[in-house]
Image (spheres, helix red, strand yellow):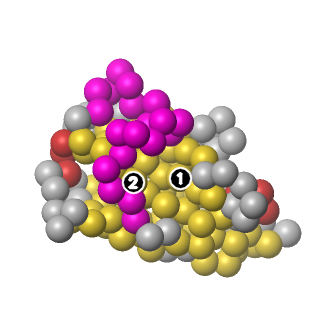
Amino acid sequence: EVQLVESGGGLVQAGGSLRLSCATSGFIFDDYAIGWYRQAPGKEREGVSCISNSDGSTYYADSVKGRFTISSDNAENTVYLQMNSLKPEDTAVYYCAGGAGVPVSSLATILFNYSDLEVWGQGTLVTVSS
């Protein structure tokens, strides 16, 4: 069974840090691109960052560039999102999602076009207090 499970969310003060984990199973990790997405109350889901597990290429939304870092551990089949300098506007449910066979040249598109994403996790809540 193809599965993504997020963890690591919680309550943190503005300026603090959290590390989210996306544990994957049921597919060949290196074949997939994994993205992190978030949805705040009353807002549409937005792409935050993504990584190609085949070569490690990454992409970030402008809103998190310089504050968030995505990484993958191919031995553990897990993708991480290190979030630093958190702001109240980062408050949202964070999801990871994966798609197979995404060309590295098209990696950034999975932050905006979800049609290539085959599997989603259940989400983890991040709350940043001011």
The kind of residue tagged 2 is Ala
Left or right of residue 108, residue 33 in this image: left
Q: Residue at x 39, y 31 (%)?
A: 107
- Magenta span covers which residues? 102-121
Left or right of residue 44, residue 71 in this image: left
- Depicted 101 relative to depicted 96: above or below: above
Label 1 crowd bin: few (<14), some (14–19), many (20+), radius 10 Å? many
Give residue 24's mark.
none
Element at label 2: strand
Disc on the earlier residue, 1 or 2: 1
The quadrant the C terminus occupies is: bottom right
Q: Answer yes or no: do the residues labelled 1 and 2 have beta carbons within 8 Å?
A: yes
Residue annotated with mark 1:
37
Q: Residue at x 33, y 56 (%)?
A: 119
Q: Residue furthest front?
A: 115
Q: Nearer the viewer, residue 44 or 87?
A: 44
Residue annotated with mark 2:
97
How many marks on residues?
Answer: 2
Q: Position of residue 98 (x, y in %)?
A: 33, 50
Q: Residue furthest bottom?
A: 11
